């Protein structure tokens, strides 16, 4: 049974930090590209950052570049998102996503809420 379980969300003040984690199970984690998405109220889900299976390639969208860092530990089957210098516009539900090579399989977690107060 495939599971992606996010944790680490919460309420933080502007300028604060949070570290999100996504624990994966039920599929060969080290062979899947991973990503973090977020969805704010009334908005579409958007990509935040992505990382290749071997963690050799990372991408961060311009709005978070220099503040957020995606990483993974393939020995622990866990994906991370370090979020620093948080802004109110970062408030959203953050989702973990796993995609197999060739986009054959596409898995999602249940999401974790991040709220940044001004």
Image (tube, grey):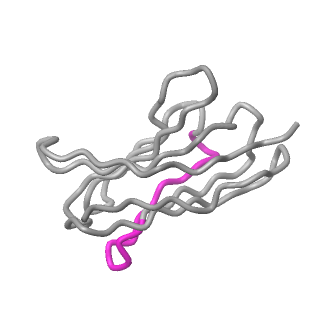
Q: Residue at x 24, y 65 (%)?
A: 1
Give percent across and percent down for residue 36: 45, 46
Q: How many marks?
A: 0
Q: Residue at x 45, y 43 (%)?
A: 49
Q: Quadrant of residue 91?
A: top right
Residue bounds of the magenta highlight: 65-78
Q: Nearer the viewer, residue 24 or 34?
A: 24
Q: Residue at x 38, y 78 (%)?
A: 76
Q: Residue at x 43, y 62 (%)?
A: 79
Give percent across and percent down for residue 102: 11, 42
Residue 58 in magenta stretch: no
Give percent across and percent down for residue 26: 25, 68
53 up-or-down from 15: above or below: below
76 up-or-down from 3: above or below: below
77 up-or-down from 55: above or below: below
Q: Is residue 111 left or right of residue 84?
A: left
Q: Nearer the viewer, residue 54 or 98?
A: 98
Give percent across and percent down for residue 66: 61, 44
Q: Is residue 116 left or right of residue 96?
A: right
Q: Is residue 66 left or right of residue 21?
A: right
The quarter of the rendered structure image containing the C terminus is top right
Looking at the image, the residue that sits furthest to the bottom is 75
Looking at the image, the residue that sits furthest to the right is 118
Residue 73 in magenta stretch: yes
90 up-or-down from 84: above or below: above
């Amino acid at each position: 049974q495939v599971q992606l379980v996010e944790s680490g969300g919460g309420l933080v003040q502007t300028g604060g930090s949070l570290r999100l984690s996504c624990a994966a199970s039920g599929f060969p984690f080290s062979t899947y590209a991973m990503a973090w998405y977020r969805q704010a109220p009334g908005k579409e889900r958007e990509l935040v950052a992505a990382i290749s299976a071997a963690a050799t390639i990372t991408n961060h969208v311009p709005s978070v570049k220099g503040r957020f860092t995606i990483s993974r530990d393939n020995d622990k089957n866990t994906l991370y998102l370090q979020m620093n210098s948080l802004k109110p516009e970062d408030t959203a539900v953050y989702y973990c996503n796993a995609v197999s090579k060739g986009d054959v399989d596409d898995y999602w977690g249940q999401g974790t809420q991040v709220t940044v107060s001004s």
